[in-house]
Amino acid sequence: MTRLDHASEIIDLAGELDVGGNAPVDAILDFCRRRIDAWVAEAGGVTTIDALEALVTRRLQMVFEEVRSDEDFDRLTQLYARGKKEFIFAVMRTKFDDPANPTFGALVLRRNAGADSPDRYVAVIDCRGSKLARRFFTRWFSANEGHTSGVSRGAKGRQ
């Protein structure tokens, strides 16, 4: 048992996933491993980390939007806020640009997406400047957020 096993967020997540017991951290990790192992087996295996990421994001109905310039925020506003009526994207830049609380990524559950939409979840990854160094890890953090159902509460940030 670890110190994290007593954290309310961990206990809540274990409850949401219907796993737990005395070691909720281990139970959550086992849940994730079993689920991904099943997806990989169904796909006939994967040979690269990129193929694994593509499989996981497809199964989670998640797309990545990488922000490499300020103009990319304008593109996201046009695509999601104006085009798909997901208004959180219109103000997202302010969260990413907050110097007191830098955000590296955010996972958004689209409110106006259909249940079978391939972009039901949008992971926005900030790759500008020094944040680029954390791109890989932020992408996988976002995939994990989607995998463990935490996105059901709406937008989630990675700081």
Image (cartoon, rainbow, N blue to C red):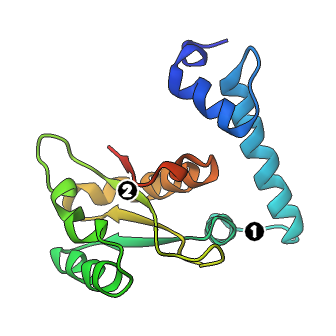
Residue 49 spot, x, y in % from top left: 64, 63
Name the residue at 20% across, 80% down: 74
Name the residue at 63% across, 46% down: 148
Callout 1 crowding tier (Cα within 10 Å): few <14, some 14–19, many ≥20: few
The residue nearer to you, when weighing 41 against 149, is 149
Q: In which quarter of the image is residue 76?
A: bottom left
Q: What element carries label 2?
A: strand
Looking at the image, do the residues carrying marks 1 and 2 touch, with CB atoms under 8 Å apart?
no
Left or right of 60 in this view: 63: left
Check the image and report above or below for 33 versus 135.
Answer: above
Residue 152 spot, x, y in % from top left: 54, 52
Sequence-first disc among 1 and 2: 1
The amino acid marked with disc number 1 is Thr
Single out the mark in the foreground, 1 or 2: 2
Specify the label residue 1 is tagged with: none
Left or right of 136 in this view: 83: left
The residue nearer to you, when weighing 8 against 96, is 8
Q: Mark 1 points at which residue?
A: 47
Left or right of 85 in this view: 44: right
The amino acid marked with disc number 2 is Ala
Distance from Cα at disc 1 to Cα at disc 2: 28 Å
Check the image and report above or below for 100 versus 25.
Answer: below
The quadrant of the picture occupied by the N terminus is top right
Q: Mark 2 points at which residue?
A: 106
Q: Which residue lies furthest to the left in this view?
A: 99
Name the residue at 37% across, 65% down: 124
Residue 15 spot, x, y in % from top left: 68, 31
The residue nearer to you, when weighing 55 against 145, is 145
Residue 21 spot, x, y in % from top left: 77, 19
Callout 2 crowding tier (Cα within 10 Å): few <14, some 14–19, many ≥20: many
Q: What element carries label 1?
A: loop
